[in-house]
Image (spheres, grey):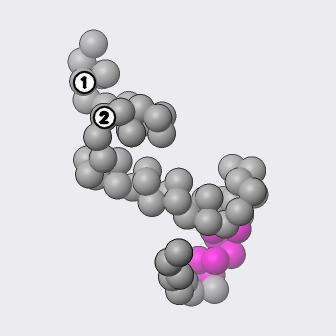
């Protein structure tokens, strides 16, 4: 388990995102946002991007 510190205003924003996404926990929301950011920056494989619902360049070319 890893613990991170966030400013209170970001925690409030994170809670709003959590509610909008209907995530059961704040950790689920953080995990999704982190994976999405890593995928957007091409640090994750195409299969993971697909699982996250991110369109890859190869899919656009089809």
Let me know if residue 12 is in the magenta part.
yes
Residue at 61% x, 59% y is 29
User: In this figure, which residue is indicated by the disc labeled 2?
Assistant: 46
Q: Residue 10 in the image: state x and y as whole percent.
A: 59, 77
For residue 18, what is the image quadrant? bottom right
Vertical order, 3 against 49 (above or below): below
Q: Secondary structure at mark 1?
A: helix
Which region is colored magenta?
A: 9-15
Mark 1, Cα crowd under 10 Å, few <14 / some 14-19 / many 20+, is few
Work out which quarter of the rendered image holds the C terminus and state it.
top left
Q: Residue 34 in the image: state x and y as whole percent.
A: 45, 60
Q: Residue 40 in the image: state x and y as whole percent.
A: 34, 48
Relative to 30, is 41 on the left or the right?
A: left
**Residue 47 visible here:** yes
Q: Nearer the viewer, residue 33 or 13?
A: 33
Q: Earlier in the sequence, mark 2 or mark 1?
A: 2
Relative to 8, is 47 on the left or the right?
A: left
Residue at 25% x, 29% y is 57
Mark 2, Cα crowd under 10 Å, few <14 / some 14-19 / many 20+, is some
Let me know if residue 2 is in the magenta part.
no
**CB contact under 8 Å: marks 2 and 1:** yes
Vertical order, 33 against 47 (above or below): below
Question: Which numbered disc, 2 or 1, marks the residue closer to the eye?
Answer: 2
Residue at 47% x, 35% y is 51
Q: Give the spatial CA distance, label 2 vs label 1.
A: 9 Å
- Residue 58: numbered disc: 1
> How would you classify the magenta stretch by its main secondary structure?
helix
Residue at 66% x, 66% y is 26
């Amino acid at each position: 388990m890893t613990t991170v510190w966030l400013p209170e205003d970001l925690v409030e924003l994170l809670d709003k995102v959590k509610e909008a996404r209907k995530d059961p926990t704040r950790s689920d929301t953080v995990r999704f946002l982190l994976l999405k950011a890593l995928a957007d920056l091409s640090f994750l494989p195409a299969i993971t991007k697909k699982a996250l619902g991110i369109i890859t360049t190869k899919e656009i070319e089809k």
